[in-house]
Amino acid sequence: MKNLATQTANATEEISGQISSIQGATSEAVTAIEAITTTIGQISEISGSIAAAVEEQGASTGEISRNAQEAASGTQQVNDNISGVSEATSETGVSAVKC
């Protein structure tokens, strides 16, 4: 009987040790999961910031494109005006020579 009690006590100690190990591993897993959750939150914030920056950059690029088109149109108008002035000057010169 004494031998059975000793075996039971040893088995109980072993089981208690295993339970302690499992509790320690569980605690470490919880800590790791909390760290992962924090990291995911940070990544989410960063992704939101990047998305906002990309949207802003797209708007800026569109504005730059519109401005470039307006500048090109303005340049064409200046060229047309210069051509008109040049033609008028030529016509004035021809008229002056005829007189």
Image (spheres, rainbow, N blue to C red):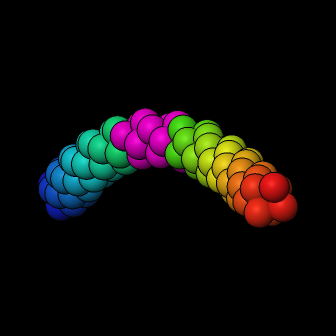
Residue at x-position 37% and y-position 40%: 42
Frontmost residue, 14 versus 99: 99
Is 8 situated left or right of 62 in this image? Answer: left
Q: Is residue 76 visible?
A: no
Q: Position of residue 88 (x, y in %)?
A: 78, 52
Magenta span: predominant SS is helix
Q: Residue at x 55, y 42 (%)?
A: 60
State the image quarter where residue 3 is shown. Answer: bottom left
Please give the name of the residue rendered at 67% of the width and 49% of the height, measured from the top-left corner: 78
Which one is nearer the viewer's eye here, 61 or 75? Answer: 75
Does the magenta run of residues contain 37? no
Question: In the displayed image of the protein, which residue is found farthest to the front?
Answer: 99
Report the side of 59 relative to 3 (left or right): right
Q: Is residue 22 above or below residue 42?
A: below
Q: Is residue 84 left or right of residue 47?
A: right
Q: Quadrant of residue 51?
A: top right
Give left or right: position of 75 versus 14: right
Residue extent of the magenta highlight: 40-54
- Residue 24 image position (x, y, % from top left): 22, 48
Q: Is residue 71 above or below residue 14?
A: above
